[in-house]
Image (spheres, rainbow, N blue to C red):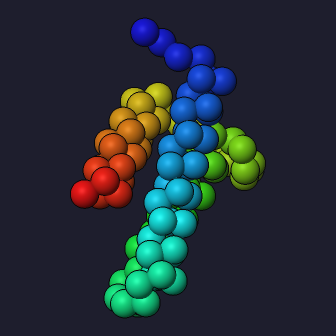
Amino acid sequence: MMFDNTQKNFTRIIYALASLSMALDVFLDIVINQKEIIIGIVISCVFLLVAFMFLIRSNFISLKRNIKEDPSTIQSADSLGFLLVIYLFYMAIF
C-alpha cells in the first residue's frame, strides 16, 4: 500500500510527538527523582534531536534542500523511525 506525502508527513509528525513525549518523560523523571541527572539530560537531548529530525523530514520545519532524495532511503528511514518509537514506548512501560 502506497502512502501519499500527506500521510507520510503525518506519520513523521506522530513519531516526533512520541519522541517529544519520551524526552519530557525522562526530564520529569530527573526532576522528581533527582538522580542520574547527567544521563537523563543526555537522553532527553537525544529524544529532542530525534523529534527535530522527524519534524524536518515531515516538512513541518522547512529547510531548503537541493538534494534529490532517494525513495528507498526515505522508506528505510521511516521504518527505522517506527522501530525507534516502538522501542521508546517499550522503555517507558518497563
State the image coordinates of residue 91 (x, y, percent, origin top left). 29, 57
Q: Is residue 89 left or right of residue 74?
A: left
Q: Residue furthest left?
A: 94
Q: Nearer the viewer, residue 5 or 45?
A: 45
State the image coordinates of residue 16 (x, y, percent, origin top left). 56, 49
Q: Residue furthest front?
A: 32
Q: Is residue 51 left or right of residue 42?
A: right
Task: Reply above or below: 92 against 24.
Answer: above
State the image coordinates of residue 90 (x, y, percent, origin top left). 28, 50
Q: Is residue 49 left or right of residue 72?
A: right
Task: Reply above or below: 71 against 48.
Answer: above
Q: Is residue 85 left or right of residue 87?
A: right
Q: Residue at x 48, y 81 (%)?
A: 32
Task: Reply above or below: 33 against 60.
Answer: below
Q: Residue at x 35, y 88 (%)?
A: 36
Name the quarter where the C terminus is drawn: bottom left
Residue 69 visible in the snapshot: yes
Q: How many labels sit on residues?
A: 0
State the image coordinates of residue 28 (x, y, percent, origin top left). 51, 74
Residue 73 visible in the snapshot: no
Q: Quadrant of residue 39?
A: bottom left
Q: Residue at x 62, y 33 (%)?
A: 9
Name the quarter where the N terminus is drawn: top left
Q: Residue at x 66, y 24 (%)?
A: 6
